[in-house]
Every structure is written in structure tokens, then in C-alpha cells.
Image (cartoon, rainbow, N blue to C red):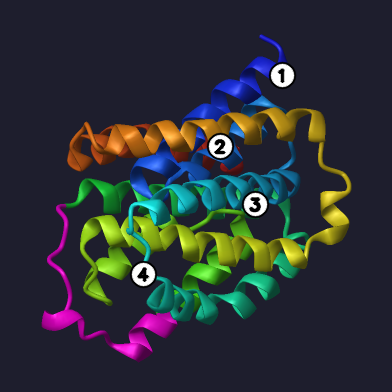
Amino acid sequence: MSALILALIAGAVVGLALGALGGGGSVLAVPALIYLLGFTPAAATTASLIIVTATSLTALYAHARTGNVRWKAGALFAAAGLLPAAAAGAAASRLPQPVLTAAFAAIAALAAVRMLRPSRAAGPAGGEARPAKAAGTGAGLGALTGLLGVGGGFLAVPALVTVLAFEMQAAVGTSLLVISANSLASLATRGATTAGVNWAVIGPFTGAAILGAWDGKRLAAKVTGTLLQRTFAVVLLAVAAFMLIDALT
């Protein structure tokens, strides 16, 4: 199968997950780029950030049209992650490739476990957030985005629900604002590495992901969130196991 066809298929799956779940698609983008399209782990994280940024902005627009984005709270949450995202992005290129792969596998497994666990109840009544915890969570998400090229939506959504007391639809929409901001901050520190990205592959991948995000938004309205999350989590666990074995052998 040609690289173009593989890029289109992988991009569609990534976009579908982002549009439907508000996160998680980027956790598939990196292994797809490495194992299907031949990218090195460092190049895959940079390419993933490009894909995630474009796709998240598209999905953000779709959710904003339906009023599911809390702009002020989301901006404050994202602001805490901007500097960590930039710093981690600058450091990522200096890490050994097996370390990046193993770290990514661990994060993918964590994402899958969180998706399989029952949803926790919303945070403090009346939407009263805990600013220190919100800032710490935002900073952690930013560092994760910069280092591994993932948006962190699989962590942002539950954090927005439990820390800021958002209902699920608002958490999904607002998480896309956080993902977009962190991804842009990390990309700003990777200017040199983006020059070596294979745009003939990344362009179709990104285009398919953007179209998939719109389909994911429609899918979320028709299929229960629990079924979507559990299906995605099982796939993610398999990917994490494969990557961890690859990193250790």
C-alpha cells in the first residue's frame, strides 16, 4: 500500500477521534507516522504537532459554532501550559529515540486506562474551580504536548470536568482550545525541525484528519460516548504494548 493511501487512512482515524472525543487522536498519530510511514520518533512528534494543530483548530471551530467552548476558562487553563510546552518542545530533539518511544507508549497506556475507567463526577458544585490544581494540570498538559507531540486531550477532558466542573460537551469543546494553544507553543520552538518534515505525506494526512474531525463531531451526536471511548481505549492499549516492546528490544 502506498504512503499516500496510508497517510489518508491514518489521518481520517486521527481526525475522527479528535472530533468525537475531543482528544486521543494525536496519540495514534505518532505511532502511525513511525510504523506505517517510516518517520523517526523525533520527526514523528514534530509532524504530529502540525497535524494536531490544524485538526484541533478545525474541530474547535465546529464546537464553537454550537456553543461548546468556554473561551475565558479555557484560555486561562491553556496559558499555564504555554511555557512548559515550549520548553519541552525544545528539549525533545535531544532525547534518545528509544526513550521517546517508551515514554510515548507509557502515555498511550495511561490514556487508554483513563478512558476505560468510569467517568468521575463533576467537580465542586456551582462550577467553583481550584485555581492551583487547574494551573498545575494545565502546565503538565503543556509539557506533555511539547515533549511527545500529543495534544493531551485525553487528560484535558477529565481535568476540565473534575477541576473546573464543566459538563462533558463543554469539556470536549474547550479541550480543543487547550490542545491548539499548547501545540502552537511547542511548534514555535521546533522551527528548525519542521524544515525536514515530509510535506508530501503530512499534507494528505492533515487534510484527511481535518475532514475526519467533522465526521467525528457528527458521530459523537449519534453514538454513546462510552462506546466510543471503550473502543478507542482497546485499540490504544494494543498500540502502547507494541511500542513498548519495540522500544525495549
**Separation of disc 2 and disc 1 at Cα?**
18 Å
Instruction: Find residue 123 and report its horizontal and vertical position in percent.
Output: 17, 75
Q: Say the numbered circle drawn on residue 3.
A: 1
What is the total number of numbered labels drawn onto the structure image?
4
Residue holding disc 3: 49
Q: Is residue 136 left or right of residue 189?
A: left
**Separation of disc 3 and disc 4 at Cα?**
23 Å
- For this orientation, the residue located farthest to the top is 1
Q: Earlier in the sequence, mark 1 or mark 4?
A: 1
Check disc 4 and give the amino acid type. Answer: Arg
**Separation of disc 4 and disc 2 at Cα?**
22 Å
Residue holding disc 2: 210
Q: Is residue 56 left or right of residue 8?
A: left
Residue holding disc 4: 70
Q: Earlier in the sequence, mark 3 or mark 2?
A: 3
Check disc 1 and give the amino acid type. Answer: Ala
Q: Residues within 10 Å of mark 3 (few under 14, many from 20)?
A: many
Check disc 3 and give the amino acid type. Answer: Leu
Q: Earlier in the sequence, mark 4 or mark 2?
A: 4
